[in-house]
Each structure stands twice: as C-alpha cells, then as structure tokens.
Image: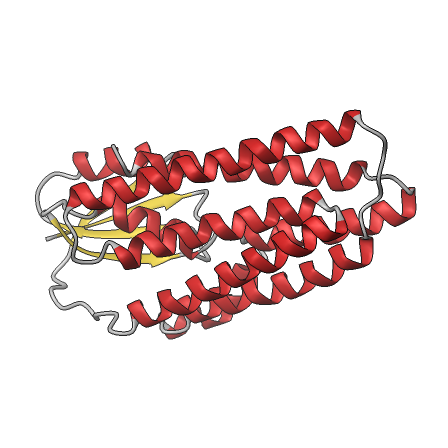
Amino acid sequence: MEKTAFKISKMDCPSEENLIRMKLEGIKSIKNLEFDIPNRKLFVFHTGQIDSIEKSIIELNLGGSKISTEKTNQINFKEEINQKKRLWIVLSINFLFFMIEMTTGLISKSMGLVADSLDMLADSFVYGISLFAVGGTLVRKKQIAKLAGYFQMILATIGFIEVLRRFLSEEVLPDFSTMIIVSIFALIANGICLYVLQKNKKKEEVHMQASMIFTSNDVIINLGVIIAGILVTWLHSNKPDLIIGTIVFVLVIQGAFRILKLSK
C-alpha cells in the first residue's frame, strides 16, 4: 500500500473535507483518507496508481497538489463511528443560523448578513448531501449535488441583483448593531462546528484548534460583517455592508460550482 500526501490550499473548514470525501467516493483503490485541516493537508492511503485520485482532487479547484508518495505498512485505520452524529449537529447549527441571519438581515436591511446566511446554507448543503445520500447510489448523490448547487447559485444571483439595486437606489443604512451582534453569535457557532467535527482528531493536533478557527473562511466572513457594521456607523454609509455582501456572494457562487463538480 502507498500513502500520498496532498496540499489542499483552499481547505479551510470541514465542509471542504466533506466535498473531497464525496468526490473521491467510489474510487476502489482508496483504502483510507486522513485530513489535517489546520495544515491544509490530505493523506490518501491507496493501492495502484494515484493518477485518477489526483485528477479528481484537482477538479474540485481547492488548490490541490501532490506533495509526495511513499510506501506504508499501515493496514488498520480508526473508523469514525460518530461521524454521522457530528454531521447532524453541524448541519443543524448551520441551518439554524441560515434562518437567523436571513431573517435578521432582511429586517435590518443588511446584505452582509443575508450573504453570510447563504454561506451557512452552502455548508448545510454539503453536510446534508453527506447525510441524506448515505447508502444511496452514485447517480442519486450526483442528482442531489446538482440540485443543491443550482439552488445555491440562484439564491446568490438574486443577492447580487439586490446589492446592485441598493448601490443605485437611495441610500438606506442597515442596523449596524444587529449586524455586529448576530455576526458575533455566528462566529461562535462556526467555532463550535469546527470543534465538533475535529474534536476526535489526533491529540497532537489539539494545539492547532485556535489557528484552525481563525483560518476558516466562514469565520473570516463573520469578522468581515462585524467590521462592515462598525464602518457603517462610522462612515454613515451602507457601502461597507454592500461590499462585504458582494464578496460573500462571490464565495457562495464558488461553493456552488464546487458542489456542481460533484454531479459530473
């Protein structure tokens, strides 16, 4: 058996891990996958050539590149018995905050919160596909991925149109206090999700938890909305909110394309 290491430069949180797992599912030569999210590395234990595996990883556009391949005698791997339970927990948290941020975003007129809610929904799609497609055929999983990807893209496009409308229409200031408070809670929720999905990883990685939390795209987005809220009240302008909303919508569409790649 061989062990091949990959650098996945855009693997910021567990949702990317699930995308990779779904993409590589069905490749019979793969015996096990080990993820080191803090260091953005993937270790593939496999037999035979690595070419098809490497091609699948590159197709996800997560900045995947092969580092090394070496022989290994390891044949026993620890099974993640509670993986399904943890997926349900993070799915529930992400979907709950999708509803909270969408509702408060519309009420407070903040596009930053609305966009972040769609990012939460995007993560929910990834976890949902992992859960609801368990035991299903590859065709079924591809169908679910395609529906999720297109739905996510439609919502993000509607968001872009609304941002453009607000840029061109009379300026209305969003409620900066709601932006900041809700984003702080979303920040905490993302930290909990990262902890839940990574808490059973190797002990030597425990000291990396803090750095992992602060390299996650989701958390950076939350911090961006908080900063936008501060700038809204400081500059007395809605432009910071619209700018962060635009950036997040771009990230949501990129996520939609990654999900759609699973359906091919």
What x and y, as percent, mark residue 114?
A: 63, 47
Is 70 located above or below residue 149 in the figure?
below
What x and y, as percent, mark residue 56?
A: 25, 36
Is 1 located above or below residue 239 in the figure?
below
Is 66 located above or below residue 33 in the figure?
above
In the displayed structure image, the side of residue 152 where residue 25 appears, left or right: left
Instruction: Report the coloring of the rendering.
Output: secondary structure
What x and y, as percent, mark residue 123?
A: 45, 52
Q: Which image quarter holds the C terminus?
A: top left
The residue at the point 30 percent across, 55 percent down is 130
What x and y, as percent, mark residue 33?
A: 24, 56
In the rendered image, which quarter is residue 156 located in? top right
* Mark count: 0
The residue at the point 68 percent across, 56 percent down is 104
Foreground of the two, 207 or 146: 146
The residue at the point 38 percent across, 42 percent down is 148
In the displayed structure image, the side of residue 46 where residue 56 appears, left or right: right
